[in-house]
């Protein structure tokens, strides 16, 4: 019997089936690894954004007074002083109005320049004033909640990145001397 060299149709189908099974298992392993890698990148990005937000908040809050800060669920506002002080009472002249707020999963920072706001105000912001702020810059994404509370001279900021535990920033602000 003269048999020509080559593969039969059954042999080709068996080999293709085995190759398909091996490739499917390999793809599932690779996909699980890629999903884990992507999740770790997102987690690291959210953590670094929250650290940057904490650093910026700390820097700005340490340069203001407790009387010029307003805090509530989803927002924090403060007046930041200029480098000059009032000659009659030594209180700072406020130069910038800064607001942080949570909208659509992002913490946004907006700033208005004010050069003629002498002394601290009882409240730096009414919540209704948020609509008249200029567009801000996003400083942290994927934030579920942003809660701020002011008790006396103690301000507490809680940042809840999506899917993570809360990051809590607590600062004691200086008070204006009576």
Image: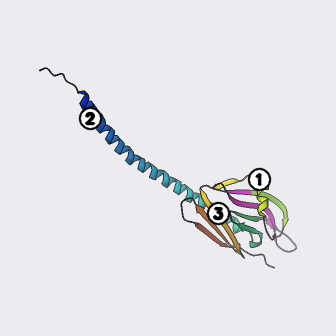
Outermost bottom residue: 178
Quadrant into which the C terminus falls: bottom right
Q: Secondary structure at mark 3?
A: strand
The image quarter containing residue 18 is top left
Question: Which mark, residue 14?
Answer: 2
Our reading of the magenta stretch's main secondary structure is strand
| Magenta stretch, residue numbers | 81-110
Question: Which mark, residue 134?
Answer: 1
Residue 87, horizontal then vertical, whole percent: 86, 71
Q: Within 10 angstroms of label 1, few (less than 14), some, or many (20 or more) residues?
A: few
The reply to whether the C-beta atoms of the residues labelled 2 and 3 are less than 8 Å apart is no
Q: Is residue 83 above or below residue 40?
A: below
Disc on the earlier residue, 2 or 3: 2
In this image, 57 relative to 33: left or right? right
Outermost left residue: 1
Q: Nearer the viewer, mark 2 or mark 3?
A: 2
Question: 21 and 140: which one is in front?
Answer: 21
x 79%, y 58%: residue: 113
x 56%, y 57%: residue: 46
State how far apart marks 2 and 1 are (Cα).
Answer: 67 Å
Q: Nearer the viewer, mark 2 or mark 1?
A: 2
Q: Secondary structure at mark 2?
A: helix
The residue pinned by badge 3 equals 146
Question: 36 and 2: which one is in front?
Answer: 2
The image quarter containing residue 116 is bottom right
x 71%, y 53%: residue: 136
- Does 84 lie within the magenta span? yes
Q: Is residue 8 above or below residue 103?
A: above
Q: Nearer the viewer, mark 3 or mark 1?
A: 3
Quadrant into which the N terminus falls: top left
């Amino acid at each position: 019997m003269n048999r020509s060299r080559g593969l039969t149709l059954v042999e080709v189908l068996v080999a293709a089936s085995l190759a398909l099974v091996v490739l499917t298992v390999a793809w599932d392993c690779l996909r699980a690894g890629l999903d884990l890698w992507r999740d770790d990148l997102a987690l690291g990005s959210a953590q670094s954004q929250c650290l940057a937000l904490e650093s910026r908040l700390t820097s700005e809050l340490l340069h203001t007074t407790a009387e010029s800060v307003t805090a509530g669920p989803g927002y924090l506002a403060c007046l930041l002083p200029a480098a000059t002080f009032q000659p009659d009472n030594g209180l700072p002249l406020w130069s910038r109005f800064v607001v942080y707020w949570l909208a659509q999963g992002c913490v946004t920072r907006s700033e208005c320049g004010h050069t003629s706001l002498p002394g601290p105000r009882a409240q730096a912001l009414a919540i209704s004033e948020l609509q008249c702020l200029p567009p801000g810059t996003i400083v942290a994404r994927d934030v579920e909640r942003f809660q701020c509370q002011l008790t006396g001279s103690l301000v507490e900021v809680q940042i809840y990145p999506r899917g993570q535990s809360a990051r809590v920033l607590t600062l004691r602000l200086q008070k204006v001397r009576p």
